[in-house]
Image: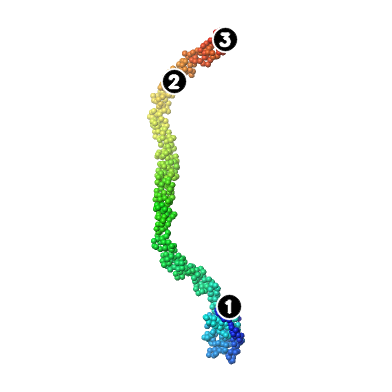
Amino acid sequence: MQKTLFLAFVLVQIGCSTNTDRANEDKGKETVQDLWGGEQGWDNDATWDTVSNEDTLQSDASWKKPCESPLDCETSACISLGGEKVCAPECLGIPCPDGLSCELMRIGGDPIWICLPPTRYLCRPCTKNAECGPPLVAHGNLCIPFGPVGSFCGQDCPPCPSNYECKEVMLNGQVYHQCLPQTGVCSCEAEFVRDGAWTVCYKENEHGRCEGVTKCLDEGLSECSAKEPKPEMCNGEDDDCNGVTDEDGAIGCTTFYKDDDNDSFGTGEAKCLCQRQGSFSATVSGDCNDKDPIVSPAQSEVCFDSRDNNCNGLTDEEGAQGCTFFYKDKDKDGFGVTSDKKCLCAKDDDYTATKPGDCNDDDALVSPTQQEVCNDGMDNDCDSLTDEEGASGCVVFYYDADQDGYGLQGVSKCLCAPEPPYTATLYNDCNDTDPTVNPGQIEICNEKDDDCDGDANEVGAVGCSMFYEDKDGDGYGVGDGVCLCHEKGFFRAKASGDCDDENPNVNPGQKEDCSTPEDDNCNPFDDDAIGCTYFYYDKDKDGYGTSTSACLCEPSGFFTAAATGDCDDNDRDVNPGKAEVCNGKDDDCDAETDEYLPVPPSNCTNFYWDEDGDTYGVLPPKCMCHQEGAFRATRLGDCDDKNANVFPGASEICDGLDNNCNG
């Protein structure tokens, strides 16, 4: 079987065939078959553009021994020649027939010199010129590059076999003439397959050219083993086949900066590399002094070393190592604003305070060392509190849980204003859970120490009762007594007035007995005494008393009258035993003054009935102290008491009446 490869010629300065070349191609042609035959089974056909073998072979053809396979030949080489298969003759010391060349071949075990057709190398995959002709024999055949598919053997020309043409080929600046296939097709001959003939092929694109190997196989040239050129990547491979692996600028590369001081920071000079390379080892730039390893953007600025340690263009800037926190202190009181600070190597403008805590940096009288002042509206000491405990001008307020105005003496705070439960300005509350108990309360009889004086229910408590000393236990005491909530000792009597506290039978509660010598009921009176006599109050000593009486054992004081009924106890001439006298008084105490009945007063006046009011009356008269009703006339003699115009002394007129009562 013939193995065929279509070749795309990518030859540099290959000359076109001349007319003479083409003329040579028309010379006699001959087919040589089965360069190698036999058990290998190679079936190679080639048409050669040479002079006819009949014209060049020795006239003595006795060397031609027909064969079908290498086993038929002493040289083990059965070749096709002139349309027949003959054994290749041995040529050691014997010249080869015309058209054949003597070549050293290893057939079986030992090498042997045999005569072979010189065109057997044409189109053989090759890597150098020496592979395109018999060894140890000078020849002009060249290993010619045929583009991506590789290099193949040409043959010095003219002449050329049929289907080949003699072309100019420029290699290494020189022009050569070599037989090249007209169609661009070379066959993988059986000998090439057997020898494992191979050539360097390549694949090429805009990324580069990658070389590989292609060799003759039974089915033809193998696929070029070259990989497809790709953009160089950082993967440990020569992706673009330029002979350099992971070169500068490969895909996935990292920018490495030149870092002479090996501090991991480089200068502006950089390369994009797959890995560190020499001094290009830093992945970060920005080193402002690549000769000093303690100077880089990763370094901390250090105060007072005259270096820009961190390469930010500043020296001893804020935050440098060894810096001191300075707080903004506008009012220059030595304290700064806590939230506004800078760590500096030295004071800077307003940042001069090393102590924080100023809560009002516009007022030098406000800082943590100031004394808090009550009621000035400021947090003087900057403790976030205004008018807090202990401020200047504070008042002691005592703990007053029950809010009764009195607190606990031992629990107090000095405050600018009361803060519950510290609200009391008075203290000594003895029960701070009861607002009704404090030193300001009045003691009450309730079993509590209401006024916090250490005693409960003491003398004089509200609701107390007077208890008097009662030694004889008769329920009546002596002395002024004590106001107690309950009896105490001999102070057990709720009533006083006992005039003999040694005798339980003598007290104000006893009944006076006129038959005993004691003052049984302890009062100066013996009224209502057992066996007593009623005596009436008789101030005027006229023997008659008022209605006020006392039952006494004997007259006493004004209680001396045995009779009552005196209506004026200040006038001894007025009493029931007196006669009525016209004097404007009820002399006889009958509830009538200057009355007529039952006995007319001794100095009374007769008044006559005077019905018509003419000052003259009729009989009988009434002797009275003053007129009363129609008893108003003091003269007698009216003859018609129905007619006021008729009375003694009236003028007589002609009217049929006795006008003057003269009869």
Give the image quarter of residue 28: bottom right
Question: Disc 2 marks which residue?
Answer: 569
Give the image quarter of residue 646: top right
Residue 416, percent across and down?
42, 45
Which numbered disc flags the more N-terminal residue, 2 or 1?
1
Most foreground residue, 178 or 620:
178
Which numbered disc flags the more N-terminal residue, 1 or 3?
1
Question: Disc 3 marks which residue?
Answer: 653
* Distance CA(mark 2)–CA(mark 1): 178 Å
Residue 436, percent across and down?
44, 39
Q: Residues within 10 Å of mark 2 (few under 14, many from 20)?
A: many
Name the secondary structure under disc 3.
loop
Quadrant of the rendering where the N terminus is positioned = bottom right
Q: Amino acid at mark 1?
A: Ala
Most foreground residue, 431 or 655:
655
Q: How many numbered marks have been drawn onto this rendered protein structure?
A: 3
Give the residue drawn at x 44%, y 45%. 419
Name the secondary structure under disc 1.
loop
Give the residue drawn at x 60%, y 84%. 19
Residue 642, percent across and down?
56, 13
Name above or below for residue 182 compared with residue 302.
below
Most foreground residue, 226 or 84:
226
Q: Nearer the viewer, mark 2 or mark 3?
A: 3
Q: Residues within 10 Å of mark 1 (few under 14, many from 20)?
A: few
Q: Amino acid at mark 2?
A: Asp
Question: Disc 1 marks which residue?
Answer: 8
* Distance CA(mark 2)–CA(mark 3): 60 Å
